[in-house]
Image: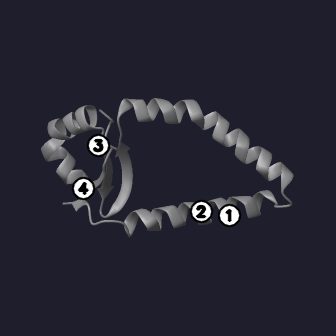
Amino acid sequence: MAKLPATEKIISARHVQRCWSRLLHNVAAKGTTYIVTKKGEPVAAVVPMTDYKQWKENRPTLFDSMHMAQQRSSLTSQQGEALAQEAVEVVRAEDTNGSSRQHK
């Protein structure tokens, strides 16, 4: 049986305090990822350990690739950082404008 894709939910820090045990169960058993917000701003993520380990293993490769791309381009460090910040903002906007999954 194929594993269902993990879900991502946005929850408030207050909700985390009330339902921590259930959230941990959902992360471990269902692969749910939680983005925790405080005053409406994302402050943390609770992710399955397998996802965290994969991210940690792939992180050096990602940064090496970014460094190589920067060396091959004609961008200054400042321009590269501005472009990276713009990419982060686009991704965050897509996450925010996605389905209404926020719990308060």
* Circle 2 Cα neighbour tier, 10 Å, few/some/many (<14 / 14–19 / ≥20): few
Q: Name the quadrant containing residue 74.
A: bottom right
> Pointer 1: what residue?
83
User: Residue 87's mark?
Assistant: 2
Q: Residues within 10 Å of mark 4 (few under 14, many from 20)?
A: many
Q: Are marks 1 and 3 in contact (CB under 8 Å)?
A: no
Q: Which residue is mark 4?
A: 12
Task: Give SS at disc 2.
Answer: helix
Q: What type is the residue that disc 4 sits on?
A: Ser
Q: Amino acid at mark 2?
A: Ala
Please tell me whether mark 2 or mark 4 is closer to you in this view: 2
Q: CA distance from mark 4 to mark 3?
A: 15 Å
Q: Position of residue 76 (x, y in %)?
A: 82, 60
- Quadrant of res 4: top left
Gap in Å between the C-alphas at discs 1 and 3? 30 Å
Real-space Cα separation, disc 3 to disc 2, in angstroms: 25 Å
Q: Quadrant of the C terminus?
A: bottom left
Going by the numbered disc 3, the residue's amino acid type is: Thr
Dot 3 or dot 2: first in sequence order is 3
Q: Are circles 1 and 2 on residues that touch, CB within 8 Å?
A: yes
**What whole-number distance in Å separates the C-alpha atoms at marks 2 and 4?**
25 Å
Q: Position of residue 102 (x, y in %)?
A: 25, 61
Q: Amino acid at mark 1?
A: Leu
* Residue 32: mark: 3
Q: Nearer the viewer, residue 27 or 89?
A: 27
Is label 3 in a helix, a strand or a loop? Answer: loop
Residue found at x 18% / y 51%: 15
